[in-house]
Amino acid sequence: MDSFIYYIKSNYDLLFKSAEVLAAIIGIFLFKKYKNDNAARLFIYFLIYVNIVETVGAYPHVLRGYPDDNWVNLALKNTVFYQNTWWYTLMWDIGVSIFLSFYFFKILKTNFFKKVVKYFSVILILYQIILFIYKFDLLINSSILNITMLHMILVVVLTSLYFIELINSDSIIKFYKSLPFYVATATLIFTIIQTPIYFFESYYNTNDESFIALQRTINVFSIILMYFTFGYGLIKSEPDTTT
């Protein structure tokens, strides 16, 4: 067990980045398959977007490779930009909230549900942006929990609306051939798994090896599960030309 945990810790970045890259590659190869499915193409663009976000977000590791007295390190020292927390808050919590809102608005067929998505998403995303601006200084040490929680609430609402509509439609017969089913399922499961971790972020201690190992193990497996589900969904699903 100790060797397994050590493997996870030693290969943490490689494991979850490999899953992200694989899903994006599958999407790119199958892009022609979904040439008439606007929602699916939007999702493939999202997978590419995730890889760009992760690549740019790795800049702190690059900076650590330079001497501490390097002019870039000196300029960024003691600012929010020295860490990548601000980047992931903006591009992941807020950016993904925007994407999911557009995506579920496109795939939902019920007018009432589309209106719920429209107004609920606008309110929550505006609130996220306001918090990001007014609490920006907090990002020097940690993420803003309120923004993360708003993102999670939005995910639960959007996926719940999709599943309610699916259950009450004829599409339930061939749900396993629908890409939105895999997207909604994987996203919801990932959110449910990740939510408890955020509540314990305040107890994070670099000296607590057990907590770090548990956190990284949960993160890796939830991320791999989500992106493998995305990739499988792209392969298994049939294009929906109505979106």
Image (cartoon, rainbow, N blue to C red):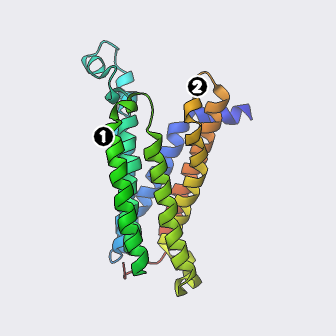
Answer with left or right where residue 220 lies relative to residue 82. right
Q: Is residue 181 visible?
A: no
Task: Tell me the quadrant of the picture where the N terminus can be found.
Answer: top right
Q: Which residue corresponds to mark 2? A: 205
Q: Residue furthest right?
A: 1
* Element carrying mark 2: loop
Q: Specify the amino acid type for callout 2.
A: Asn
Q: Is residue 179 left or right of residue 32?
A: right
Give the x, y percent position of residue 56: 33, 39
Q: Which residue is mark 1?
A: 133
Q: Is residue 109 above or below residue 84?
A: below
Regarding mark 1 in the picture, which secondary structure is present there? helix
Specify which label sits upstream in the sequence, 2 or 1: 1
Vertical comparison of 186 with 70: above or below: below
18 to the left or right of 48: right
CA separation in Å, label 2 and label 1: 27 Å
Given this view, does label 2 or label 1 mark the residue nearer the observer?
A: 1
> Disc 1 residue type?
Ile
In the rendering, at what x and y percent does residue 36 appear? Answer: 33, 78
Residue ID at (60%, 48%): 221
